[in-house]
Image (cartoon, rainbow, N blue to C red):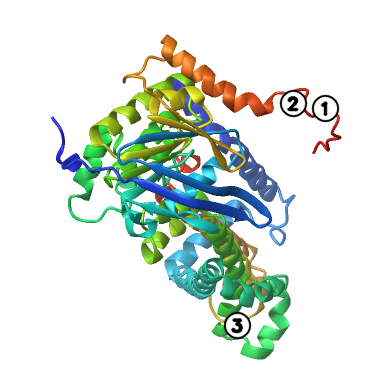
């Protein structure tokens, strides 16, 4: 039993390890040019030297700051407007059609306009991230509020709940699973949009680091940047999942699988 | 032995319906129902699906407003007694994100809310499940929590909208006994809507039949409690009411065979 468990822990890692070993071998034999792909060891060394010089941490901090600021602005607005249109019929009639139309514009298509409006400084990156994360959160909040079980609302009303207590006890918790789905989508989009924004123009951040390295053919540094983005994306996803487990622990679908 | 949340016993609320009618758009669901329920009485309303019995109950609960007529509770307009009336639905309608205890506490204020909720839970035999999520309870347990949630408000009129309809036969009998025992103890007025004639006869002082939005039968049940499902008097009454309920579903007799009929 324990042996099988240990095997289960190891099995998922066999393929990645083989790929890395094959990659290292191909690089060493000269079959794979370092201009295309540096050897894994070189990537690790580049990572280490960037970490030691403090460059890495600074760039990660700057990129994360941008991502979170964009998320706070776009996500906050999306949440507020979603709550508004989900709760009040008048707000829905007034705003929802407009927002649903704007939603069909891909944020990245706005890049030329964004550059014209904001130039290439910080506000352009914030704007792109904010507008990208706005819609998943808005749509899922709106949908979540709308799909709260009407039977529960009726029950709560007949138990004397009105106004804010009804909202706090029934409507918000009922909408929360959907809102968290929106957050998860947004976290994924957040990094994608930031990568694009930083690749176009930046004087700092992970995107700047990779674009700079490209100029000097430092493929190892480029790869460090790519892996950093992957790592940060995964981290955001884990945080979102943690939030779901914490706030939706009443829901059997979000209980951690039997260990 | 009795806990303080039920003393003093709440006195039942009398119900008076005068020409109560309800229509949804073109469809008239209830036609001028007039009915009096004595304080503390247990009334069961039976009828086939779509006859308007649930609408009648929802009017009593104030979940719908009548198109004509009035609901009076204890000689006052129903609106004055909102807090004395509690309803149990066919589904338990527990908040899945609140624990069992928090569900029972819903709408209770005051510091003793948790203590009262615990007592109510103990009363339905679920004291040990107070901190569980509703998702892990069985259907019968969920309805017991819903019953505790209603009882903790000391209702003077308890409305039951087929609350046992979705339960298996054994759990249903268990729940019937529980409902009967709390009713006998707390003396609230109870109105039970059900499609199960045996359930109506087992619990009620009076069985009403609603057909096409009218009360067409008002049958007192004079059996001693607790009632035995199998006893001859029980079976006789059940059979009589059932025959009356089913009469209209039988193929029409020879009275009107010549009339052409459109079948929807």
Whether pointer 3 and pointer 2 mark residues with C-beta atoms closer than 8 Å, the reply is: no
- Measuring 71% from the left and 71% from the top, which residue is drawn there? A106
- Mark 1 residue element: loop
Q: Chain of mark 3?
A: A
Q: Chain of mark 1?
A: B
According to the picture, the residue beneath numbered tag 1 turns out to be B257
Q: For the N terminus of chain A, which image quadrant?
A: top left
Question: Reading the chain from its start, which is encountered first: label 2 or label 1?
Answer: 2
Q: Chain of mark 2?
A: B
**Number of numbered discs overlaid on the protein picture:** 3
According to the picture, the residue beneath numbered tag 3 turns out to be A124
Whether pointer 2 and pointer 1 mark residues with C-beta atoms closer than 8 Å, the reply is: yes
User: Alpha-carbon neighbours of circle 1 within 10 Å: few (<14), some, or many (≥20)?
Assistant: few
Q: Position of residue A240 (x, y in %)?
A: 48, 55
Give the foreground label among 3 and 1: 1
User: Alpha-carbon neighbours of circle 3 within 10 Å: few (<14), some, or many (≥20)?
Assistant: many
Q: Position of residue B27 (x, y in %)?
A: 67, 52
Of B93 and A33, nearer the camera is: B93
Up/down of B231 relative to B26, above or below: above
> Same subunit under labels 2 and 1?
yes
According to the picture, the residue beneath numbered tag 2 turns out to be B252
**Mark 3 → mark 2, Cα distance in angstroms:** 78 Å
């Amino acid at each position: 039993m324990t042996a099988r468990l240990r095997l289960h822990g190891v099995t998922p890692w066999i393929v990645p390890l083989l790929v890395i070993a094959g990659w290292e071998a191909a690089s060493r034999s000269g079959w794979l040019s370092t201009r295309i792909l540096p050897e894994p060891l070189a990537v690790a060394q580049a990572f280490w030297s960037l970490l030691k010089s403090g460059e890495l941490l600074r760039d990660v901090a700057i990129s994360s700051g941008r991502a979170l600021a964009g998320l706070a602005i776009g996500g906050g607005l999306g949440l507020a407007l979603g709550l508004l249109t989900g709760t009040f019929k008048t707000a829905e009639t007034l705003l929802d059609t407009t927002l649903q139309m704007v939603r069909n514009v891909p944020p990245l298509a706005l890049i030329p306009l964004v550059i014209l409006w904001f130039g290439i400084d910080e506000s352009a990156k914030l704007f792109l991230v904010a507008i990208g994360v706005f819609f998943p959160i808005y749509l899922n909040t709106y949908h979540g509020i709308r799909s709260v079980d009407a039977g529960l609302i009726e029950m709560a009303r007949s138990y004397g709940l009105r106004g804010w207590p009804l909202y706090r006890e029934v409507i918000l918790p009922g909408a929360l699973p959907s809102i968290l789905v929106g957050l998860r989508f947004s976290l994924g989009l957040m990094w994608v949009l930031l990568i694009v924004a930083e690749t176009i123009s930046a004087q700092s951040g992970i995107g700047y680091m990779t674009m700079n390295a490209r100029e000097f053919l430092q493929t190892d540094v480029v790869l460090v940047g790519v892996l950093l983005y992957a790592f940060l994306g995964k981290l955001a996803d884990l945080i979102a999942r943690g939030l779901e487990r914490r706030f939706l622990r009443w829901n059997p679908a979000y209980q951690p699988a039997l260990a | 032995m009795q806990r303080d949340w039920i003393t003093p016993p709440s006195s039942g609320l009398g119900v008076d319906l005068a020409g109560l009618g309800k229509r949804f758009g073109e469809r008239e669901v209830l036609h001028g129902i007039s009915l009096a329920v004595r304080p503390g009485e247990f009334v069961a309303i039976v009828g086939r699906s779509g006859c308007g019995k649930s609408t009648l109950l929802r009017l009593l609960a104030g979940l719908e407003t009548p198109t004509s007529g009035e609901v009076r509770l204890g000689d006052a307009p129903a609106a004055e007694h909102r807090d004395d009336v509690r309803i149990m639905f066919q589904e338990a309608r527990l908040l899945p994100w609140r624990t069992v205890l928090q569900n029972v506490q819903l709408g209770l204020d005051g510091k003793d809310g948790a203590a009262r909720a615990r007592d109510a839970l103990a009363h339905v035999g679920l004291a040990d499940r107070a901190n569980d999520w509703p998702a892990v309870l069985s259907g019968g347990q969920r309805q017991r929590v819903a019953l505790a949630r209603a009882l903790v408000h000391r209702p003077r009129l308890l409305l039951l909208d087929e609350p046992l309809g979705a339960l298996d036969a054994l759990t249903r009998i268990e729940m019937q006994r529980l409902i009967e025992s709390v009713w006998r103890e707390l003396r609230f007025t109870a109105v039970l809507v059900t499609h199960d004639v045996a359930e109506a006869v087992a619990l009620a002082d009076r069985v009403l039949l609603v057909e096409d939005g009218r009360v067409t039968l008002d049958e007192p049940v004079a059996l001693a409690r607790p009632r035995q499902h199998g006893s001859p008097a029980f079976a006789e009454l059940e059979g009589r009411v059932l025959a009356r309920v089913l009469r209209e579903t039988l193929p029409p007799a020879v009275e009107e065979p010549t009339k052409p009929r459109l079948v929807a």
